[in-house]
Image (cartoon, rainbow, N blue to C red):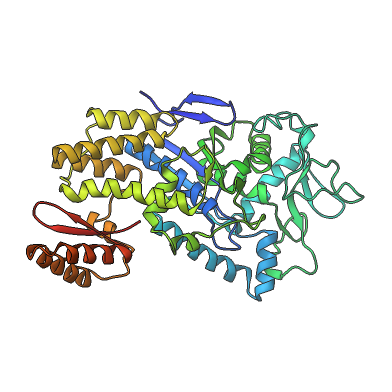
Amino acid sequence: MSLRIYNTLSRDIVDFTPAEPGHVRMYVCGMTVYDLCHLGHARSMIAFDVVQRWLKASGLQVTYVRNVTDIDDKIIKRAVENGETIRGLTDRMIDALHQDADALGIERPQFEPRATDYVPQMLSLIGTLEQKGLAYQAGNGDVNFAVRKFSGYGKLSGKSLDELNAGERVAVNTQEGGKEDPLDFVLWKSAKPAEPDDVKWASPYGFGRPGWHIECSAMSCELLGESFDIHGGGADLQFPHHENEIAQSEGAHGKPLAKVWMHNGFINLDNEKMSKSLGNFFTIRDVLKAFDPETVRFFVVRSHYRSPLNYSDVHLNDARGALKRLYTALQGVPAEPVTIDWGDPFAARFKAAMNEDFGTPEAVAVLFDLASEVNRSHSSPLAGLLKALGGVLGLLQADPQSFLQSGSMLDDAAIQLQIQARALAKQAKNFAEADRIRNQLLAQGIVLKDSATATAWEAAQ
């Protein structure tokens, strides 16, 4: 069965074949780096990390680009508030982004372009749009895209021009010297006297800086070509950002920007989208103080990337408990290193799930079925398959015992002394004392697991 992907542009699941046989070119909109990443950002990064992992597992070469927006109104405001340079702030936030992403097992993209390194390409693209009559310089010095002159505008969001509203980052100004139409969006922002010098670039339109939307059109074209296979990002980017990217890129080049458009769902808090603008977010670092990184990743991966995902400590604890069941199977049976045989029934089901729009919930269900079989059969090759299939999702690569014992407030040596004391109590038939030791450890977050030959322990979830 070939790979099928839900295409936001066509609003259905389509068969996917890369334009260049064996090679997928994918661009994903990354973060605006004025603050630490929150869990919503983590979801998008994990979702497309799984996409590129599955493409590679399917034998495809992947060129994966995820940009960084390092010039923006919010960045300027934060840098001024902090008394630091734009570069100082963005360097610091990019380092933090990498630390958080690395902790969550997110592989680095092949290219991570910074917007400020591609200003010449943005100006070239703006010049092309101006020559084609799709851009104009307003009296206030800004250069705007003339939305109504691009006949395909609205095809991604599925709305007519009259139904659309300018997006949240688009300043609407139809007064003298501003936009000719409220739907027009800015390509180049004229410099303001009060802005720092390090956010002003020379251009044919005077000193200024790029608008948000033009960044991705220029960077994706430079690194992947005028048309490529997959363009991804969060559902909130569908309009206006991605709609505007299509208008800019296709207006300039006259060809489809991307074959397939993918959008991941939101993480919600109390059924409301988690975002910095709403102030209802948890940074990745906040969450990792309470939960281990693999549990957070598993919490995201076991839901389909397009579905909404509700955050709560209850759901994270449930994810931790479920992940422990998989690691318990691997702790009980040594995992023999294997190369995945996609003809194996478990592997075939996993592949079918992933090939149907990256169906991770069904793929995770296969992992649990496989773990049950490992527990029943004690088969090392099956344990190896469980670990290998988990690896495709970025899971189950830690040492099982280390994972199961992680989060304990006691060290192993202290726990082992209590286990020995309990064993002596049982030998003396002092079962009350043995129960007291078990209960005391349980109160300290330690669960004892008795087998025929030994007693092991793990941290309670």
Quick check: 288 left or right of 116?
left
Quarter placement of the N terminus? top left
Quick check: 304 left or right of 171?
left
The foreground one among 236 and 16 is: 236
The foreground one among 23 and 284 is: 284
Percent position of residue 404, x then y: 27, 56
Percent position of residue 54, x then y: 37, 38
Quick check: 246 left or right of 68?
right
Q: Residue at x 38, y 52 (%)?
A: 295
Percent position of residue 3, x then y: 40, 28
Rendered position, 277 above or below 262: below
Rendered position, 182 above or below 313: above
Q: Residue at x 59, y 54 (%)?
A: 118
Quarter placement of the C terminus? bottom left
Q: Residue at x 31, y 34 (%)?
A: 366
Can residue 168 be seen by looking at this rendering? yes
How many numbered dots are placed on residues in this image?
0
Can residue 107 be seen by looking at this rendering? no
The foreground one among 43 and 378 is: 378
Percent position of residue 257, x then y: 58, 35
Q: Residue at x 68, y 35 (%)?
A: 251
Quick check: 455 left or right of 106?
left
Name, please, the residue furthest toward the right: 176
Q: Quadrant of residue 23?
A: top left
The foreground one among 330 and 115 is: 330
